Image: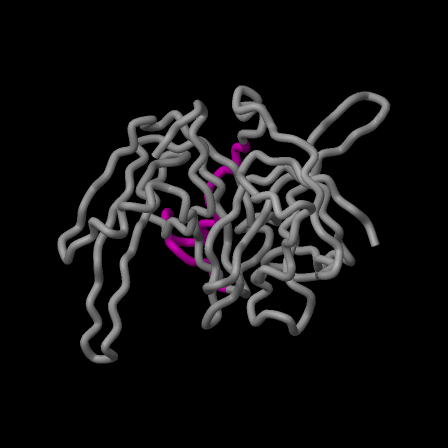
């Protein structure tokens, strides 16, 4: 039952009240400190429908908050064998997480990754990936930390009168590797007042930090035969208050 030291790069909402938390392993050796593979702690089998972390799964010593860029020692039981999300590890429920420190924001450029595309199979910029898509085409990871260009948020309140349902969509539109993407933002710390401002018309919001940010992009758990592409965290490269 290993403990893994992880720098948190996403802590987003997932199927309320669940959370999706993910980051890169911090490897300490005789040669110093380096970053290892992505790790996504998930609830043990059967405790949550889609592996989302409930409050019992991410308790911390002294109840400290889990924020992006924090470094935590996380108790893990075993690595899953999910082909669509190979970074998944079962957490140990009854052991709290231990905060060890915080990654300095000036170190963020060293973490940037450069995949050739964001899991596109046939259609550049598509918002989803079929669960049976070939690994060789979509890539072996379901997480990436990228730097976007022309980043902005698109906000709209959607009415569905046929089932008495209303939702607010916040999507991040951006360009990456010559392709245009528009993906749901699940980072609820990203300008939370945007949802309150949503109307039936689409609002475009350009954050004050512009493209000086990184996006943690992720594939969701399977839903109706697809993994959906999400923006799990918007991380400014400089300190920023929403």
Q: Is residue 128 left or right of residue 86?
A: left
Residue 209, by quadrant, is top left
Quadrant placement of the N terminus:
bottom right
From what the image shows, is residue 156 above or below residue 29? below
- Does the stretch in magenta take in 122? yes
Residue placed farthest to the bottom in the image?
A: 162
Along the viewing direction, whichever of 16 and 214 lies nearer the viewer: 16
Residue 165, by quadrant, is bottom left
Exactly how many numbered labels are in the figure? 0
Residue 203 image offset from top left, x and y in percent: 18, 46
- Does the stretch in magenta take in 12? no
Q: Residue at x 63, y 54 (%)?
A: 58
Along the viewing direction, whichever of 87 and 99 lies nearer the viewer: 99
Find the magenta span and give its range.
113-130
Q: Residue at x 69, y 66 (%)?
A: 44
Q: Is residue 184 left or right of residue 157?
A: right
Q: Is residue 141 left or right of residue 170?
A: right
Q: Is residue 226 left or right of residue 152?
A: right
How does the figure colour the protein chain or chains? Answer: one colour
From what the image shows, is residue 110 above or below residue 127? above
Residue 228 image offset from top left, x and y in percent: 44, 58
Residue 65 image offset from top left, x and y in percent: 56, 44
From what the image shows, is residue 93 above or below residue 233? below
Along the viewing direction, whichever of 242 and 210 lies nearer the viewer: 242
Residue placed farthest to the front in the image?
A: 62
Residue 151 image offset from top left, x and y in percent: 32, 35
Residue placed farthest to the right in the image?
A: 30
Residue placed farthest to the left in the image?
A: 201
Quadrant placement of the C terminus:
top left
Q: Residue at x 61, y 42 (%)?
A: 23
């Amino acid at each position: 039952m290993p403990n893994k030291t992880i720098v948190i790069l996403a802590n987003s909402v997932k199927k309320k009240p669940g959370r999706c938390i993910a980051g890169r392993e911090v490897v300490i050796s005789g040669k110093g400190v380096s970053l290892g593979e992505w790790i996504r702690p998930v609830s043990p089998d059967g405790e949550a429908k889609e592996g989302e972390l409930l409050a019992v799964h991410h308790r911390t010593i002294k109840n400290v908050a889990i924020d992006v860029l924090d470094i935590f020692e996380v108790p893990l039981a075993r690595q899953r064998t999910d082909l669509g999300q190979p970074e998944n590890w079962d957490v140990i429920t009854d052991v709290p997480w231990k905060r060890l420190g915080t990654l300095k924001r000036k170190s963020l450029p060293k973490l940037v990754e450069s995949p050739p595309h964001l899991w596109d199979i046939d259609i550049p910029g598509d918002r989803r990936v079929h669960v049976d898509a070939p690994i060789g085409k979509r890539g072996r990871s379901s997480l990436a930390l990228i730097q976007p260009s022309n980043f902005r948020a698109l906000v709209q309140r959607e009415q569905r009168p046929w089932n008495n349902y209303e939702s607010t969509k916040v999507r991040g539109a951006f360009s990456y590797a010559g392709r245009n993407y528009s993906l749901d933002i699940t980072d609820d710390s990203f300008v939370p007042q945007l949802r309150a401002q949503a109307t039936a018309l689409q609002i475009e919001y350009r954050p004050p930090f512009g493209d000086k940010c990184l996006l943690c992009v992720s594939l969701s758990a399977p839903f109706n035969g697809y993994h959906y592409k999400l923006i799990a965290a918007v991380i400014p490269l400089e300190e920023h208050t929403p």
